[in-house]
Image: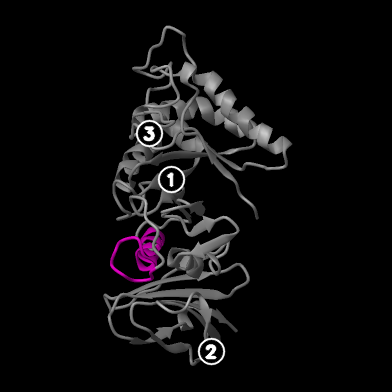
Amino acid sequence: MTRFYADAWSAPGYMKTNGTDANGGTLCGLAGATCASGDWRKAYANYLVQYAKFYAQEGIRITDLGFVNEPDYTATYDSMRLTPTQAAEFTKVFGPVAKAGGYKVVCCDSFGWNQQKNYTSAIEADATARGYVDTHAGHTYASPVDGPLPTRKRTWMSEWSPGGTTWNEAWDDGSGYDGFTVASAVHDALTKGDTSGYVYWYGASTGATRGLIQMDGANYRVSKRLWALANYSRFIRPGATRIGATTSDGDLRLSAFRDTDGSVTVVALNAATSATPVSFSLRNIGFTNGTATPYLTDGSRSTARQPALPVTGGALKATVPARSLVTYTVER
């Protein structure tokens, strides 16, 4: 299944209180945003859907559509301010137009996870708005994931990368830009936030980039940040369901997922400075015997396949190397 999420950073300037695409401003016609040019709410809803239709004409089918990005942050580039109340208000205008066009509505991509909780709460408190939003999404620049958003709808961590502009290829150097940092952030989003999607900002660029890949003409370099994501994204596929994974070891961060084909993926991030022997009990998820294939990322290996391990008597015994990320794919 292929999904494309398109999220507008701003309405066109002529539809906003400040008359320009950049530097915030609010959509004319919303409560508290009166403009001499009139009410642009419905026009903006139609504008967004038409934008998606233009992509469809070129063979790119957008499935999920958002109307604002970081509505609590004023940027010198394209940006638009909306309060949680205004976001809920516009959802009731945009929702019917988006649904008629066959698009799923996403809101609101707040600057921080805790800040997104306010937007989600405002939408959830309005029965009409709640019915139109399919996915609640937040970023983690202003605040990290510390718990789920206050909704039973699908949630995404839809944008984050370490602050600043820096190129770093290290797995675990304590800089905050390394692969281990990214792996920890993904783990928290999936387990603490119970998210079903994670989007890293951004894939590839040139110079001193915090992206995953550094482009240099015909050449390129790869950061360990890429492999931190790969240990999750290569094995946890669309349609997978997260299942319970617990441990009494505070340095061992576990998550587990059942795929649509019945296989199970267990991801172990070891924050300890020494190797950790573990015994995974798999009997409660239906595995008494089988095979587990580990994929290891650390300072010298990048999602590297390791020798298969047996599952016997409902248990998988393994050793997770120090400060490493290991993904186990378990099959009968």
The crowding category of the residue bearing disc 3, from other C-alpha atoms within 10 Å (few below 14, some 14 to 19, many at least 20), is many
Specify the farthest residue to the front.
Answer: 217
- Of mark 1 and mark 3, the one earlier in the sequence is 3
Residue that badge 2 annotates: 307
- Of mark 2 and mark 1, the one earlier in the sequence is 1
Instruction: Place residue 36 in its image quadrant.
Output: top left
As shown in the figure, which amino acid type bears the numbered disc 1? Ala
Residue that badge 1 annotates: 137
Quarter placement of the N terminus: bottom right
Q: From which residue to which does the magenta span run?
A: 170-190
Pointer 2 and pointer 3: residues touching (CB < 8 Å)?
no
Q: Is residue 164 left or right of residue 135?
A: left
Nearest to the eye among marks 2 and 1: give it.
2
Pointer 2 and pointer 1: residues touching (CB < 8 Å)?
no
Quarter placement of the C terminus: bottom right
As shown in the figure, which amino acid type bears the numbered disc 3? Pro
Residue that badge 3 annotates: 71
Q: Using the numbered discs, state the Cα–Cα distance from disc 2 to disc 3 in whole angstroms.
A: 48 Å
* Element marked by disc 2: loop
Q: Is residue 243 magenta?
A: no
Q: Is residue 172 magenta?
A: yes
Out of 102 and 205, give the one closest to the viewer.
205
As shown in the figure, which amino acid type bears the numbered disc 2? Pro
The percent position of residue 262, horizontal first and vertical second, equals: 60, 73
- Of mark 2 and mark 3, the one earlier in the sequence is 3
The percent position of residue 80, horizontal first and vertical second, equals: 40, 28
> Is 173 located above or below residue 11 in the figure?
below
Out of 302 and 60, give the one closest to the viewer.
302
In the picture, the disc for residue 184 is none
- Identify the residue shown where x is 36% and y is 35%: 125
